[in-house]
């Protein structure tokens, strides 16, 4: 059992949990994730390790409410326990001195790029972070990203805060201005990562994306998380989740993410009915 020591609502439908998990806190590296299970009847879902505090023995996860399990997680409060937290899982991000690194986070992806941005900065890179949100009220962790970046550009789709448009618009502006970019690292909705990769490819800018396929065991035993990268089949949980964005078959990934849509809807409706929410 893993105790929640702190919970915070960062924005509507985005919850932060600091969880007591000393072993994971000690071993986790930027880019890695955990698999959690709330209770005995729960499913396993993957969530990125957004921060660690090895002294305190805690890890931080930030989860967006999108369906049954993440909504149920959103009802958990400090003092409650998660049944299983497995990790750290996946390959750590490749951190090196690249030069200028553009970190792009879309929505909850902003929390996921934080530990990578911090490590990139520490390795001596010039870090430009582009944080993309749908609208102003969803903006979070701007200050936290500022503390590990040389420049921060916030975009909102509706222009209610920062630059109007998508993260790709901010990236295109940097490219058009002739800024020197040695690496782009993008985490967010699959469609965002696809467009980031399409934008950088003709310019030959190396682009790393963190893929989010459906996972079950997340230890390489089943292949549910398989993705096609450079024509080869890879298991995102053990070979990734980070891959070269120019090599990923994003359309296949998006088709596979939709595979259980009807069952996910059924399970969420049932959960809401049981709580008198509909
Ligand atoms: C390596 C990795 C890291 C992730 N990190 C984060 C994170 O830090 N914060 C965050 O909010 N989300 C993260 N996700 C996505 C998160 O796992 C899904 O949002 C969650 O599983 C949805 O479960 P649900 O029951 O609430 O929603 P559902 O209604 O079951 O599903 C909603 C959508 O989420 C996706 N999904 C469903 N089940 C899974 C599963 N077992 N594994 C992966 N995706 C699934 C599908 O695309 C589905 O259409 C990550 C995914 C991966 C693979
Ligand atoms: S989730 Fe089973 S192999 Fe990756």
Image (tube, helix red, strand yellow):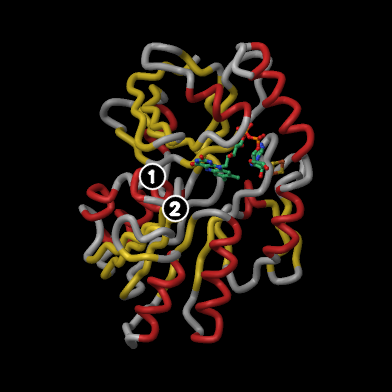
Q: Quadrant of residue 247?
A: bottom right
Q: Residues within 10 Å of mark 2 (few under 14, many from 20)?
A: some
Q: Is residue 251 above or below residue 217?
A: below
Give whichever of 88, 252 is nearer the camera: 252
* Residue 207 rendering spot, x and y as whole percentages: 50, 71
Mark 2 residue element: loop
Mark 1 residue element: helix
Q: Quadrant of residue 215?
A: top right
CB of residue at label 2: within 8 Å of ligand 1?
Answer: no
The residue to which callout 2 is attached is: 134
Residue in the image at 35% along x and 28% along y = 58
Task: Say whether marks 1 and 2 touch (CB < 8 Å).
Answer: yes
Quarter of the rendering occupied by the C terminus: top right
Q: Quadrant of residue 4?
A: top left
Position of 73 compared to 80: left or right? right
The quarter of the image that holds ligand 1 is: top right
Residue in the image at 67% along x and 63% along y = 250
Residue in the image at 44% along x and 32% along y = 24
Position of 212 compared to 188: left or right? right
* Residue 59 rendering spot, x and y as whole percentages: 38, 32
Give whichever of 28, 131 is nearer the camera: 131
* Residue 188 rendering spot, x and y as whole percentages: 51, 54
Give whichever of 55, 36 is nearer the camera: 36
Q: Residues within 10 Å of mark 1 (few under 14, many from 20)?
A: some
Residue in the image at 71% along x and 19% along y = 270
The residue to which callout 1 is attached is: 138
Q: Is residue 30 above or below residue 149?
A: above
CB of residue at label 1: within 8 Å of ligand 1?
Answer: no
Give whichever of 51, 166 is nearer the camera: 166
């Amino acid at each position: 059992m893993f105790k929640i020591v702190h919970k915070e609502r960062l924005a509507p439908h985005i919850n932060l949990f600091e969880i007591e998990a000393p072993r994971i806190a000690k071993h986790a590296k930027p880019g890695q994730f955990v698999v959690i299970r709330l209770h005995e009847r729960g499913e396993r879902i993957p969530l990125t390790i957004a921060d660690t505090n090895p002294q305190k023995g805690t890890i931080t996860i930030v989860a967006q409410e999108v369906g049954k399990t993440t909504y149920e997680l959103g009802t958990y409060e400090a003092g409650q326990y998660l049944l299983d937290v497995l990790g750290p899982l996946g390959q750590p991000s490749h951190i090196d001195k690249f030069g200028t690194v553009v970190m792009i986070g879309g929505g909850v992806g902003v929390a996921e790029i934080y530990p990578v941005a911090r490590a990139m900065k520490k390795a001596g890179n010039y870090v430009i972070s582009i944080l993309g949100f749908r609208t102003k009220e969803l903006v979070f962790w701007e200050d936290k990203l500022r503390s590990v970046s040389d420049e921060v550009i916030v975009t909102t789709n509706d222009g209610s805060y920062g630059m109007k448009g998508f993260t790709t618009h901010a990236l295109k502006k940097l490219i058009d201005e002739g800024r020197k970019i040695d690496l782009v690292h993008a985490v967010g909705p699959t469609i965002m990562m696809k467009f980031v990769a399409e934008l950088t490819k003709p310019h030959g800018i190396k682009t790393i994306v963190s893929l989010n396929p459906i996972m079950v065991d997340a230890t390489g035993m089943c292949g549910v998380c398989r993705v096609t990268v450079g024509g080869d089949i890879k298991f995102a949980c053990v070979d990734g989740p980070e891959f070269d964005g120019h090599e990923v078959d994003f359309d296949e990934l998006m088709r596979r993410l939709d595979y259980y849509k009807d069952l996910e809807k059924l399970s969420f409706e049932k959960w809401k009915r049981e709580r008198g929410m509909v």
